[in-house]
Image: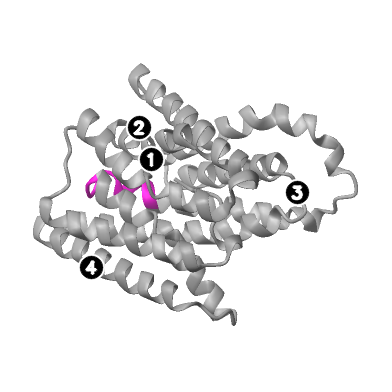
Amino acid sequence: MGIAVAGVSFSGPLTAMAVAPVLAIAFWRNAGGAVALLPLLLRERSSLAGLRPRDLGSSVLAGLFLAAHFAAWLPSLNMTTVAASTALVTTTPIWTALVARFTGIRLPATVWWGLVLAIAGAGLIAGVDVAVSLEALAGDGLALLGAIFAGGYVLAGARARERLPTSVYAVIAYSVCAVAVAAGALLADVPLTGFSTRDWLLIGAITVCAQLLGHTLLNQVLSTVGPTMVSLVILLEVPGATLVALVLLQQAPPLLALPGMVAVVAGVALVVRGSRPTTLVEPAT
């Protein structure tokens, strides 16, 4: 889990360092992740016997939500600070908890207190960014939108893994995500190739650190330590990404935003502790 947290902590800072379009980064990290997991899929191909096309639907839906997540969150890294963007995008458990409530599941008081604390923290961050620039405030909004789409990815992924091994699910979701992002890039006339050597190295580092070491290892330990522990550990990405951004980008969040970031992390931690386990898995960053 320590290696995994270190891996996802590099996701935001390395993306902010790249000149390549964010859609290209999202495409290559997901395409690379799918290709890297193919050997595991081939080893477990016997588990595909008896599966029907509708059994794969949740994986496809998860991939579409993941594409929307990256399309919203990655641009925010160049609009606001990496620290603020990462803190806001980790609010995914809040949105999955709200979905659970709307489907009739009663939430304990701990979850509601966590929601209030996280919302207050997000308000503090937004208030500080209003003073910085409207672009920074828009970046906060995109990070929150990315967290909402990540919530859809989490819920669809949880349903998909009821029938599919993690490797099968991940290859399908990553592949669908890559195809959806490529289609969006084509429509928006965004190039997917022709970058500098430096950008290719950064894209490779993002794929290895965030997509493989981060996501893959967290999914690997999920069955042994449980979704609640994994979800709590993912929150360490916020201070981790802040430190990496400080070293690589010389970027520190405004001091006035720090209480808001702490409140968001603490609030999400309360939500995680009080939520159902099925709403807490699958990191998206």
Image coordinates of residue 108 in percent, x first then y, are 48, 77
Q: Which residue is mark 3?
A: 164
Provide the residue span drawn in magenta: 73-81
Residue 37, above or below 112: above
Please tell me whether mark 3 sits on a helix, a strand or a loop.
loop
Q: How many angstroms separate mark 1 from mark 2 (CA)?
A: 6 Å
Image coordinates of residue 201 in percent, x first then y, are 40, 20
Residue 121, above or below 46: below
Q: How many angstroms separate mark 1 from mark 3 (CA)?
A: 30 Å
The residue mark sitting in front, 2 or 3, is: 3
Near mark 2 (Cα within 10 A), the count class, few <14, some 14-19 or many ≥20, is many
Image coordinates of residue 32 in percent, x first then y, are 56, 30
Q: How many angstroms separate mark 4 from mark 3 (CA)?
A: 39 Å
Please tell me whether mark 2 sits on a helix, a strand or a loop.
loop
Q: Amino acid at mark 2?
A: Ala
Q: Which residue is mark 1?
A: 22
Q: Which residue is mark 4?
A: 123
The residue mark sitting in front, 1 or 3, is: 3
Q: How many angstroms separate mark 1 from mark 4 (CA)?
A: 26 Å
Q: Looking at the rendered structure, which numbered label has been put on residue 20?
A: 2
